[in-house]
Amino acid sequence: MENSVLSLVPPILALVMVLLTRRVLISLGAGIFVGALMLSYADLPAGSSLWEGILSSITSSIVMIYEIVKGLIITDGALNTWNMYIIFFLFLLGMITSLISLSGGSRAFGEWAMKRVKTRAGAQLVAVILGLIIFIDDYFNSLAVGNVSRPITDRHHVPRAKLAYIIDSTSAPVCVISPISSWGAYIMSIIGGIFVTLQVTGISALGAFLKMIPMNFYAIFTLLLVFASIFFNLNLGKMREHEERAILHHQLVDPSKGKVPGQSDVIESKNGKVRDLVLPIIVLIVATVSFMFVTGANATEGEATLLKIFENTDVSASLLYGGLAALAITLLLAFMKRMPTAQIVGGIGSGIKSMVPAISILFFAWTIIEIIGQVGTGVYLAHLIDGRMNVAFLPVLLFVISSFMSLATGTSWGTFGVMLGIAANIVSVVDMNMLLPAMASVLAGSVFGDHCSPISDTTILSSTGAGSHHIDHVLTQLPYAVTAGLLSVVGYLILGFTGSTLLSLGVALILLALFIYMVKVREKVLLAKTASSEN
């Protein structure tokens, strides 16, 4: 089924259903089942009757889905540590969050922050700054920033969807332009292999990565839009509804959708201290980063440079160990407050329960990503590129193809792995001067598609970290992501024809400023019309 347009059916079905029904699990389930049916039908023996074919396909699909889910848990007779450590960490995070709330740490930290962070813009800037600082890994960024920022943004009535947008837009975009991160190490390892294969000399993988940073237009414009959304109160699309609900009615989430993942049922103590939140978070950050260094150093052969350590670090194991350390200090603080054991056990149970919805979505997302890989969606999209085109269009075309691949597959890392090599091989034939712009456009498009995809694990974890309904985060982030994506298209067109990064950035920045001005003018017109109609 590879190299066939039919390979697009499962991801497109899931994406369309998500948008139409707003039911994430049902939509992902439909995409999973249809994809499995397609694979099963393709394997039917010749001469099967229609009824036999239907029954056989359904049976085979169920077995296939079972085997995929089983593989997410157990691989080669052993625990699938990458997936399961992430799951265990989410459960640990739920327990920690629940116990911090139970002890009154969230309330105390919120009251402390209110005395120092005086405005809604300031509360949002705290989340942005934390997102920029915690650039080691996107998973860690999404969950840590959310738990630290949420008490502050909640007190200033910032909707959870806005917090999720800030978290998601300062995690992957920062990681993808940071050489000292799990992303940077992974990308440079791919680039290094490409350079060896194509016999590229005169520039190292690190040098190429650094030169591509100003060419990564999507990451740059996404970060600029985050600041614009705060300083200019730029509320696009559905975000306006969430902002109005939070400001006017102090409802941080849509009450019609019920409870959100990560929110426990415990009653907050009024006797909490700031340390009840700060100490567990500090331990979580320090322990996780320390274990990243330890696991990376242990897995590195030869000289253990900083880049090699990050290339070989075990992120999921580091998160798990850091989570266990943070849980230990959280429990210690709870016992020091002489909280009843039954109350602590109840808090732990509530924390575990609160993470079940998010983990369910994550399992469904992993399953459909596996199905999509088997039907060959990524391979089909990659083969749409024709090396005989005008080389000036290559950066923008690679950006678009990478965007669709990441959107459909839900993985930017998988798109990096496929598309960076394809981009390099094309330019090696047509024009080696386009090597860095071509690879930069792949990186940018991969993150853009990932931001738009409801099946992306980083999108799911951003929702979880912020305490937002997942579908609300997807729909409210989409207008901002598309805006940054369109600006990137303009930038890559100019870059392809002129070869000037500075000119490309300059023109796109002018367009961004004009866009912000037009949005604010339109808001003033709407407000004037509303005021006149009320009078």
Image (spheres, rainbow, N blue to C red):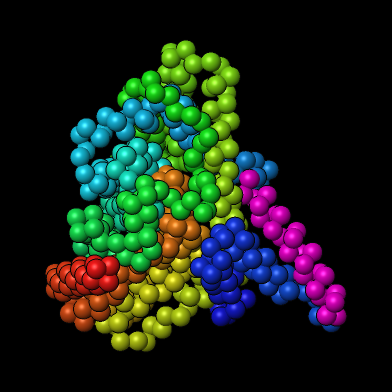
In this orientation, which residue lies closer to the viewer: 165 or 45?
165
The residue at 45%/33% (across/down) is 97
**x then y, percent, for residue 326:** 43, 27
36 relative to 160 in the view: left or right: right
**Residue 270 falls in image quadrant:** top left
Q: Nearer the viewer, residue 329 or 153?
A: 153
Specify the quadrant of the image occupied by residue 242.
bottom left
Q: Is residue 406 magenta?
A: no
Q: Position of residue 528 (x, y in %)?
A: 21, 70
The residue at the point 29 percent across, 43 percent down is 156
Say which quadrant the C terminus sits in: bottom left
324 horizontally vs 125: left or right: right
From where the camera sits, is residue 405 visible?
Answer: yes
Image location (x, y in percent) of residue 107: 36, 30
Residue 53 in magenta?
yes
Which residue: 46% across, 80% down?
Answer: 384
Magenta highlight range: 48-73
Residue 171 in view, yes or no? no
